Amino acid sequence: MNGNSLKFYLGCGVALLAALLLLGSVQNEYVFFASYVVLQFIVLAIAWNILGGYAGYVNFGTSAFFALGGYSALFMIKAFAAPLVVQIIVAAMFTGVLGLGIGLLSLRLRGIFFSIATVAMAIICETIITNTEFLGGAKGVQMTRPDPIAPFTSYTKMLFFVMAIMTIAAIIIARYIENSWIGRGLRAIRDNEEAAECMGVPTLRLKLIATVISGALMGAAGAPFPMYMSFIEPVSAFSLNYSVSALAMPIIGGTSSWLGPVIGAVLLGTVQQLVTVTISSELNVLIVGVLLVFFVVAAPQGILGLFKKRAEAPKPAAGGAAK
């Protein structure tokens, strides 16, 4: 293990320790309620970036994977009274397999045609769920939270810590992909897919791997949603806000690295939660739109791109500075 990897894993351990300290030192439940949302968006942004940032395939179907993760968990609760860990595992497996199937059908499309296919997929999935009575149909299902597992004193705190673990896991997966042959291949696809194919890069296989991992992470992020809200129904679960936010956050932070989605999600998610408390939740979409337009125009490489550009800028010579 080299020095950078050691620092990375040490940072992950410190972040998890900070989450534990927060659980013991803060009593206000809303802090964990809001922090859960920020962590959830970090996972969604990272998941989107694996396919949209590394490979350049813009996915507007995040809300479908997220919602199907929640409904997979609901199915496991109603059918088997499964615990939360099992719900998350099943949701990740289901949405991962769904990602594989959708990838086989749509990844031969490129550009706007692929993006339109993901929107159509989201609409189809929402229609199916709306007409499935066992999952509540259009009216939704009211959930009753079970007692929290020791040492947690509330279910909200437990969900916060579970999402913190999922966030660390998503970051580790994204970093591994970025530094592995998978990441190099995906970047080659993003830069020039035809040239990558000519050089022997297994483009379809790499895109399928990215779709499966991306879909699994999105589904895992959505699995605790029914218990988090104590209610689930198609309109809110399939909200386009999840797709737009998951796309905007990596663009704001920077799509070239695993760190970009984390920065964008923390920035945008925190601002949205503050605005929800102080002004109105109706402004959340407006904030996303304004920040997205600003960064697309002023900083197309995101916040990481700005720092990189500043670091690479030539410094004036000492003599010239003196003059």
Image (cartoon, grey):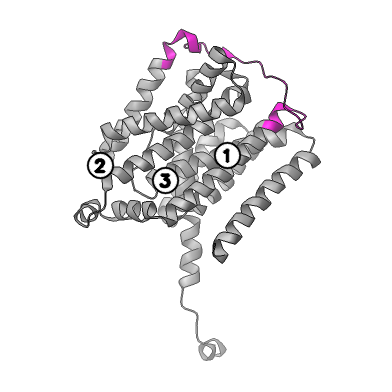
Q: Residue at x 32, y 36 (%)?
A: 115
Q: Amino acid at mark 2?
A: Arg
| In the foreground, 201 or 40 | 201
Residue 211 in percent (x, y) is at: 37, 39
Question: In the image, which residues are magenta?
Answer: 129-158
Q: Secondary structure at mark 3?
A: helix
| In the foreground, 70 or 28 | 70
Rendered view: 90 above or below 263: above
Sequence-wise first label, 3 or 1: 3
Q: Secondary structure at mark 2?
A: loop
Q: Amino acid at mark 3?
A: Ile
Number of the label disc, if any, that sits on residue 256:
none
The residue to which callout 1 is attached is 166
Number of residues whose C-alpha sits closer than 10 Å to that of mark 1, classed few (under 14), some (14–19) or many (20 or more): many
The residue to which callout 2 is attached is 110
Q: Amino acid at mark 1?
A: Met
Residue 207 in percent (x, y) is at: 32, 43
The chief SS type of the magenta part is loop
Tell me if 135 is positioned left or right of 29 in this view. left
Q: Residue at x 48, y 31 (%)?
A: 92
